[in-house]
Image: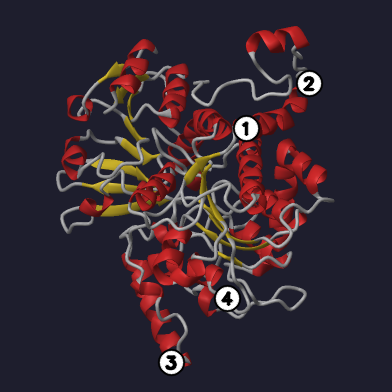
């Protein structure tokens, strides 16, 4: 689940300091001390205290907790079967989470069909998967599918705000080691990944990552463990970029699958999903009327394209910023004005970042924004908006609602900041389950391919999913629409030089 003008849906920059997780096993006294320190850190993260919110606006089942001042790390919790290998906000929420998972399954036909078709063969038998993704009802369907296909999994969150607490509880109750809750601190975030990776009698052999954080931690802190990994599946632009950097520096010692650039990922999760979720999340968080609003979307990759189409369809005047002349030309041909951010920043009512880059919106830009401007990010990384530059004494932070802050200047001007610059669609709304079904099926097939590949098929490099698998994922979802594919005759297949069963397009084809 991601996004991207070249960006994707999820979480935290992988080059952050890991020192906060190095000593999580300590004496009771040190635990008590760290608990009080964590509490003060949580309160100081933002003057709005929005980081302590556990309420998930995408969920209506009582996600908010009356115990937000007590870290889940300091609670003693057990499942109904007495299992303790997990850390969630409140295990008692598991019944609500199970209902949400059941709702998601109804709208995820592809991954459910894959589960039914492959459950007898158990293609992932022997796989031990570390998962670091968003933890929501849709991801839970993927997790339970992987288990049904024979895998053992341990799971953690790639984003401190996107976890649905009740779903995490439902997974823990079902026996899955899950370490995540909504509103983690930075230290909690790395602690959870560490607990997921480093467990007694556990040697992972596969990584499913969203943003590269689990890969980064294992490579840096557990290099011997990392060398025994059979393969990595990465679904975000940010994470894929880091994998290519590792490969270029000859530090990638295992094969990796770039799922983000699979057609079934970029076209559906990035384009169609964000086309719907940008509107949903902005409406839920601000109650904004779109007709006539001036909006600038930074980045015209698949995510930016989806956002622009949706906003234009509701009557917004949309501007686009781009660095890539090809994407910029596409924006022009689609009827959008391509501008520099400084040219329109004083005029616009809404700013949306979708680049995967850093400091796209700087303090200088925010100083020029007009009163009431809405600022949000739908790109993977939380670095696109320079939120750190807003934490200065002359600015006042005022919490409005869950994940919505007013940042007020000395002259009274205020901007509306959503989710402290993190991913708006997974923080402030839900994402379409059907689209996640497509991505989840792609991820599952990538794991199966890497895990079962004969030795030597994949070297220590980054690969794209074979197109035949992309086509198979698409075919799993066509029955939902009662769609019937035309079949090539022998003569037609010979004329085109194709196998009748596909693949039907070359790898360089642009859908």
Q: Distance between the residues labelled 3 and 1?
A: 53 Å
Find out whether the residues at labels 3 and 2 contact each other: C-beta distance under 8 Å: no
Residue name at image x 42 percent, y 17 percent: 315
Judge left or right: residue 394 versus residue 75. Answer: left
Count neighbours of disc 2 (C-alpha within 10 A) and say few if under 14, some if 14 to 19, many if 20 or more: few
- Residue name at image x 41 percent, y 49 percent: 243
Which secondary structure lies at badge 3? helix
> Mark 3 sits on what residue?
29
x, y (%) of residue 3? 46, 38
Q: Which of marks 3 and 2 is nearer the N terminus?
A: 3
The residues tagged by marks 2 and 1 sit, at their Cα atoms, a distance apart of 19 Å
Mark 3 or 1: the one toward you: 1
Give neighbour class at mark 4: few <14, some 14-19, many 20+ (Cα, 10 Å).
Answer: few
Q: Which of marks 3 and 2 is in front?
A: 2
Q: Quadrant of residue 84?
A: bottom right
Residue 335, above or below 49: above
N-term-proximal mark, 2 vs 1: 1
Query: In this figure, which residue is indicated by the disc labeled 4?
Result: 199
Looking at the image, tell me whether mark 3 or mark 4 is earlier in sequence order.
Answer: 3
Residue under label 2: 482
> Considering depth in this image, is 84 or 326 the residue closer to the camera?
326
Residue at position x 58%, y 32% in the image = 264
Cα distance in 3D space between marks 3 and 4: 23 Å
According to the picture, the residue beneath numbered tag 1 turns out to be: 470
The vertical placement of 488 against 288, above or below, is above
Sequence-first disc among 1 and 4: 4
């Amino acid at each position: 689940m991601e996004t991207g003008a070249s960006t994707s849906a999820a979480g935290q920059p992988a080059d952050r300091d890991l020192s906060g997780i190095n000593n999580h096993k300590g004496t009771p006294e040190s635990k008590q001390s760290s608990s009080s320190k964590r509490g003060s850190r949580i309160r100081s993260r933002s003057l709005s205290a929005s980081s302590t919110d556990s309420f998930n606006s995408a969920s209506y089942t009582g996600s908010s907790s009356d115990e937000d001042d007590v870290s889940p790390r300091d609670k003693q919790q057990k499942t109904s079967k007495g299992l303790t290998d997990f850390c969630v906000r409140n295990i008692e929420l598991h019944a609500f989470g199970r209902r949400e998972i059941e709702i998601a399954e109804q709208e995820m036909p592809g991954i459910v069909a894959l589960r039914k078709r492959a459950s007898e063969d158990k293609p992932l038998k022997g796989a031990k998967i570390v998962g670091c993704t968003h933890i929501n009802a849709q991801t839970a369907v993927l997790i339970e599918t992987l288990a049904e296909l024979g895998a053992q999994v341990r799971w953690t969150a790639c984003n401190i705000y996107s976890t649905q607490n009740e779903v995490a509880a439902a997974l823990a109750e079902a026996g899955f080691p899950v370490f995540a809750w909504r509103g983690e601190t930075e230290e909690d975030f790395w602690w959870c990944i560490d607990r997921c990776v480093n467990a007694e009698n556990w040697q992972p052999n596969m990584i499913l990552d969203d943003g590269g954080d689990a890969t980064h931690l294992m490579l840096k802190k557990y290099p011997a463990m990392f060398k025994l990994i059979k393969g990595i599946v990465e679904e975000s632009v940010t994470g894929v970029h880091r994998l290519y950097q590792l490969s270029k520096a000859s530090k990638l010692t295992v094969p990796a699958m770039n799922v983000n650039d699979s057609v079934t990922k970029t076209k559906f999760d990035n384009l169609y999903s964000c086309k719907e979720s940008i509107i949903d999340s902005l409406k839920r968080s601000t109650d904004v009327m779109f007709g006539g609003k001036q909006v600038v979307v930074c980045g015209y990759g698949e995510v930016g394209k989806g956002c622009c189409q949706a906003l234009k369809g509701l009557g917004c005047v949309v501007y686009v910023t781009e660095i890539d002349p090809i994407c910029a030309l596409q924006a022009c041909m689609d009827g959008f004005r391509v501008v520099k951010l400084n040219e329109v920043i004083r005029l616009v009512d809404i700013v949306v970042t979708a680049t995967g880059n850093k400091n796209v919106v700087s303090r200088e830009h925010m100083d020029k924004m007009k009163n009431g401007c809405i600022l949000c990010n739908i790109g993977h990384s939380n670095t696109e908006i320079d939120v750190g530059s807003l934490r200065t004494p002359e600015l006042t932070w005022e919490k409005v609602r869950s994940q919505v802050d007013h940042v007020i200047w000395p002259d009274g001007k205020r901007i509306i900041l959503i989710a402290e610059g993190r991913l708006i669609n997974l923080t402030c709304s839900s994402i379409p389950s059907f689209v996640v079904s497509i991505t989840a099926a792609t991820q599952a097939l990538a794991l199966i391919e890497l895990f079962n590949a004969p030795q030597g098929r994949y070297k220590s490099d980054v690969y794209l999913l074979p197109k035949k698998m992309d086509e198979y994922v698409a075919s799993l979802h066509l029955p939902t629409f009662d769609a019937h594919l035309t079949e090539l005759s022998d003569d037609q297949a010979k004329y085109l030089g194709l196998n009748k069963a596909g693949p039907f397009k070359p790898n360089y084809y642009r859908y």
